[in-house]
Image (cartoon, helix red, strand yellow):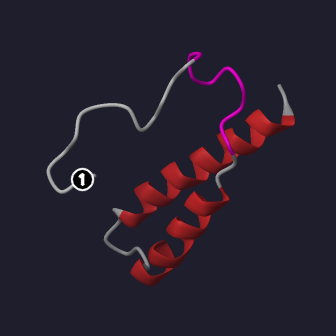
Amino acid sequence: MCERFEDYQRTVMLLGSLALYGERSDADGDFVDVVGPALAVSLPEPPPGMFPPGYDPTAGPDYPGGR
């Protein structure tokens, strides 16, 4: 497995674990508020082949309050 994919996968797993932790009754909300955005920003570009050729994540319907 390529290193980029491993980094991407590891960061996504950490975000998922943080989301589960954030739902616990004894979760530290300040920790979740700080670490969540930091992890999201550190998410590397998806590795090649993760999305089909020509995929545009900004394409799609307009949502209320959106663009």
Tell me the residue at 67%/20% (across/down). Answer: 49
Number of numbered discs: 1
Residue furthest to the front: 67
Q: Position of residue 60 (x, y in %)?
A: 31, 31
Please state the extent of the stretch shown in magenta in the rendering. 45-53
Q: Residues within 10 Å of mark 1 (few under 14, many from 20)?
A: few
Tell me the residue at 45%/76% (across/down). Answer: 33
- Which residue is tagged 1? 66
Q: Tag 1: residue type?
A: Gly
Q: Is residue 34 above or below residue 45?
A: below
Residue furthest to the top: 53
Q: Position of residue 40 (x, y in %)?
A: 56, 59
Q: In the image shown, does 17 or 12 lie closer to the viewer?
A: 12
Q: Position of residue 17 (x, y in %)?
A: 52, 53
Identify the secondary structure beneath mark 1.
loop
**Where does the N terminus fall, quadrant-wise?**
top right
| Membership of 47 in magenta stretch | yes
Q: In the image shown, does 44 or 55 lie closer to the viewer?
A: 55
Residue 4 appears in which quarter of the rendering? top right
Q: Is residue 45 above or below residue 56?
A: below
Tell me the residue at 62%/24% (across/down). Answer: 50
Tell me the residue at 51%/66% (across/down). Answer: 36
